[in-house]
Image (tube, rainbow, N blue to C red):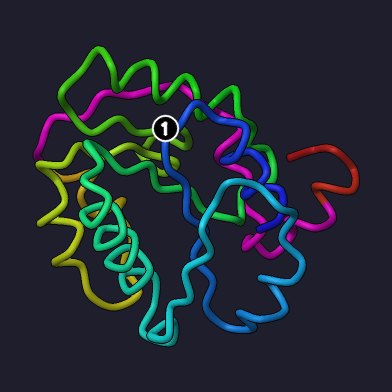
Amino acid sequence: MLAAAEHICQAQTTARAVIVGANAEAVRAALTPCSAEVLVNDKWAEGMASSIRLAVAWAEMRECDALLLVLCDQPKLDARHLNRLIAEHELAALPVASFYAQKQGVPAIFPRSSFPDLAALRGDFGASKLLNGKAAVARVLWPEGEFDVDEPDAEQRLLTNQG
């Protein structure tokens, strides 16, 4: 999470928030200071959708034109990729997804018109449900996104630089 927060702070965004759930106080204390608000998701046990709904509510309160969703479990993430997504978003009035492992995924940017669909998500489902549906989505290639620390052999692959 710490690395993801640093990359978000380095990206060309106008407003930033980091959502924490389980162990919120420990994570908050470990975050390096940057211009990101820390939002505590008290409903974290429900799953990923509760964090997305919190992000949407935050973006709506700030009248944001779009929402960039980033996960903390992709160690190969960097600000350069986030800025590529932002640049593509400026060209398209569509959601913009990272493309890896033959699918569209996060990090991804959703225009304000997508906020109701994001707010309707429930359970342990993320935005990939929307990105891989029937709606048009712009893509930014990011093969490094396939590496996810939630995979069973992720730690070993990261240590041996195979991921």
Tag 1: amino acid: Ser
Residue 89: percent from left, percent from top: 29, 22
Task: Give the farthest residue toward the top.
Answer: 91
Q: Report the side of 128 relative to 111 (left or right).
A: right
Can residue 139 be found in the magenta stretch? yes
Return the x and y of residue 105 as percentages of the image width and height.
38, 42
* Picture residue at 12% right of the left edge, 56% below the top: 117
Residue 20 higher or lower than 127, as above or below: below
Q: Which image quadrant for residue 10? A: top right
Residue sitting at x 81%, y 47%: 158
> Residue at the spot x=28%, y=17% of the render?
90
Left or right of 69 on screen, residue 29:
right
Q: Nearer the viewer, residue 66 or 45?
A: 66
Query: Which residue in the structure is indicated by mark 1?
Result: 98
Q: Quadrant of the C terminus?
A: top right
Q: Residue at x 20, y 18 (%)?
A: 92
88 relative to 43, above or below? above
124 or 72, which is in the foreground? Answer: 72
Find the magenta span and give its range: 134-156
x then y, percent, for residue 52: 33, 63
Q: Give percent across and percent down for residue 77.
A: 63, 37
